[in-house]
Image (spheres, rainbow, N blue to C red):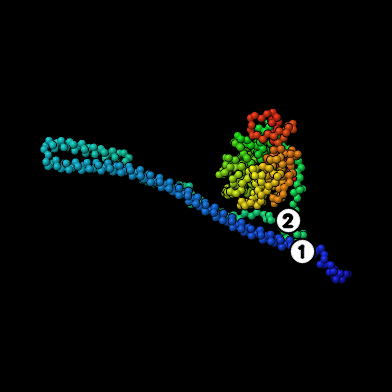
């Protein structure tokens, strides 16, 4: 057995010293990052409390303003009706007073007549008195027989809806603690260390899609006038859903796992702009200027619910718990549990996606891709020459952002918004792409594109044009399916 001194000769110069030094630095850096993260969360929670309190006070002001309006309206109505009754009764009182004065005057004349009048004067006077008293008696009789002396009362009935507030409304609202997975990446140490280890994520350079199939479009839809793809979605069972949108109408079309057309799911009036899978058999469809988002039961082929909003609904995304509905001005978060709404003024997007609580958006005119927190704070903004007029976007299970670009490309942006890579282009048959989606579990991706019957390289992006020539009719839209 070797003596201990032989083992200790080169300990200080061994590789282990450098490894443990690096381990200590990593652990310290991890503590520093986590501490920074928690302090940031404390600040965020404080901001959330402030915004929630502002919403509560704003709602209280709205309720007070609404109730004050209702109160003033009914007080005005009360005043009007009381004035009408008062006017009618005062008119009758004036008439009665005039008749009473007339009778009093006759009484005085009758007294004078009995003392000083001649027989002839008495006879004529009695005839006049008889006529006047008959008229007075008839007036009283008419009053009694008519409705002028009916008892008229003012009565108040409080609205049953208003009464129900006191009985049915149990609280001002609910405060929920919504937990989302920890997403902070810290330095991973060696496997035998007790510290947080980041899962291995393939580099962006290794993302290479391989073509699996092309959706088979029915013959009667093979023209630019017949099919205009605004969204394409992969359902959990592997089927494909296409949103076909035109000026006067739009349709949800269902395709099988092997890409064959199955049926029309539901039809909408006017143009629709986007769709997303929600949960179970439900998908959401953004109905644009109708200020509505429809929830559609794909299995039952019907609209199960329409959500009305105070904004254009141009894009929609869901994680099964909420809907994010966006346009170029703002976004609305709709809770699917109680249908409550939260407006995010700073979050704008013509196309949106959700991943681990964050909101991702693309702006066509800005040539940018954005990443926001669920409270509306901007995490990063990405711009690159490969991304021109971005349209649809989606994310895989590792947080890579797949963006459809108008320059006939599909570009992948890294999770932190630092780098990108073009993975599909015109050389792969990508022409006039608009929509994209990915199944995060299987890595299957679908991209809309335009193809031609005979390979003509026409580029008709008109919508419902009536003057398309024969060559344009040879082009039609479909979608390619890839495996990542």
Q: Which mark is residue 21?
A: 1
Residue 85, given in percent of the width and then of the height, sits at 34, 43
Residue 367 in the figure: left or right of residue 51: right
Residue 92, given in percent of the width and then of the height, sits at 29, 42
Residue at disc 2, secondary structure: loop
Q: Which image quadrant for residue 435?
A: top right
Q: Residues within 10 Å of mark 1 (few under 14, many from 20)?
A: few
Specify whether residue 236 is in view.
no
Q: CA distance from mark 2 to mark 1?
A: 20 Å
For image coordinates 61% across by 42% down, the residue present is 314
- Quadrant, the C terminus: top right
Q: Which mark is residue 207?
A: none
Residue at the disc numbered 2? 198
Name the residue nearer the viewer: 411 or 168.
Answer: 411
Q: Residues within 10 Å of mark 2 (few under 14, many from 20)?
A: few
Residue 404, given in percent of the width and then of the height, sits at 69, 42
Do callouts 2 and 1 mark residues in contact (Cβ within 8 Å)?
Answer: no
Name the residue nearer the viewer: 88 or 225.
Answer: 225
Nearer the N terminus, badge 2 or badge 1? 1
Q: Residue placed farthest to the right in the image?
A: 1
Name the residue nearer the viewer: 320 or 390.
Answer: 390
For image coordinates 74% across by 42% down, the residue present is 424
Residue 368, given in percent of the width and then of the height, sits at 66, 46
- Quadrant, the N terminus: bottom right
Residue 457 in the figure: left or right of residue 13: left
Specify whether residue 359 is in view.
yes
Q: Residue placed farthest to the top in the image?
A: 470
For image coordinates 70% across by 46% down, the residue present is 384
Q: Which image quadrant for residue 48?
A: bottom right
Q: Is residue 161 above or below residue 137?
A: below
Q: Tell me the mark number nearer the camera, choosing from 2 and 1.
A: 1
Q: Is residue 122 above or below residue 43?
A: above
């Amino acid at each position: 057995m070797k003596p201990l001194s032989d083992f200790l000769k080169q300990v200080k110069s061994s590789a282990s010293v450098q490894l443990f030094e690096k381990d200590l630095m990593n652990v310290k850096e991890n503590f520093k990052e986590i501490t920074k993260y928690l302090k940031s969360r404390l600040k965020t929670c404080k901001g959330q409390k402030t915004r929630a309190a502002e919403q509560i006070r704003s709602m209280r002001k709205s309720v007070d303003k609404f109730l004050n309006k209702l109160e003033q309206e009914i007080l005005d109505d009360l005043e009007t009706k009381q004035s009408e009754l008062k006017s009618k009764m005062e008119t009758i009182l004036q008439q009665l007073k005039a008749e009473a004065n007339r009778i009093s005057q006759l009484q005085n004349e009758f007294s004078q007549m009995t003392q000083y009048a001649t027989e002839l004067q008495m006879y004529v006077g009695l005839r006049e008195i008889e006529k006047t008293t008959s008229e007075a008696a008839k007036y009283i009789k008419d009053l009694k027989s008519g409705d002028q002396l009916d008892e008229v009362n003012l009565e108040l009935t409080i609205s049953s809806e208003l009464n129900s507030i006191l009985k049915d409304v149990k609280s001002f609202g609910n405060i929920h603690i919504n937990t989302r997975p920890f997403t902070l990446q810290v330095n991973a140490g060696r496997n035998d260390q007790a510290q947080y280890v980041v899962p291995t994520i393939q580099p962006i350079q290794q993302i290479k899609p391989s073509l699996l199939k092309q959706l088979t479009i029915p013959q009667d839809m093979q023209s630019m006038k017949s099919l205009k793809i605004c969204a394409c979605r992969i359902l959990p069972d592997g089927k494909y859903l296409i949103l076909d949108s035109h000026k006067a109408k739009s349709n949800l079309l269902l395709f099988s796992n092997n890409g064959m057309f199955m049926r029309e799911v539901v039809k909408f009036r006017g143009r629709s702009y986007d769709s997303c899978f929600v949960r179970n058999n439900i998908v959401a469809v953004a109905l644009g200027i109708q200020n509505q988002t429809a929830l559609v039961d794909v299995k039952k082929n019907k609209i199960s619910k329409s959500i009305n909003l105070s904004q254009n609904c141009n894009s929609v995304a869901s994680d099964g718990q909420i809907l994010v509905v966006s346009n170029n001005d703002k976004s609305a978060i709709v809770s699917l549990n109680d249908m409550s709404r939260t407006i995010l003024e700073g979050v704008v997007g013509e196309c949106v996606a959700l991943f681990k609580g964050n909101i991702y958006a693309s702006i066509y005119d800005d040539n940018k891709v954005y990443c926001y927190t669920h409270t509306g704070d901007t995490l990063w903004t990405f711009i690159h020459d490969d991304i021109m007029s971005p349209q649809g976007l989606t994310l895989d299970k590792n947080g890579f952002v797949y963006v459809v670009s108008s320059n006939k490309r599909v570009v992948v942006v890294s999770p932190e918004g630092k780098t990108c890579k073009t993975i599909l282009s015109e050389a792969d048959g990508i022409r006039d792409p608009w929509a994209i989606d990915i199944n995060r579990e299987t890595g299957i991706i679908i991209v809309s594109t335009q193809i031609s019957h005979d390979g003509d390289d026409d580029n008709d992006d008109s919508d419902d044009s009536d003057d398309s020539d024969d060559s344009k009719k040879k082009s039609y839209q479909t979608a390619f399916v890839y495996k990542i």
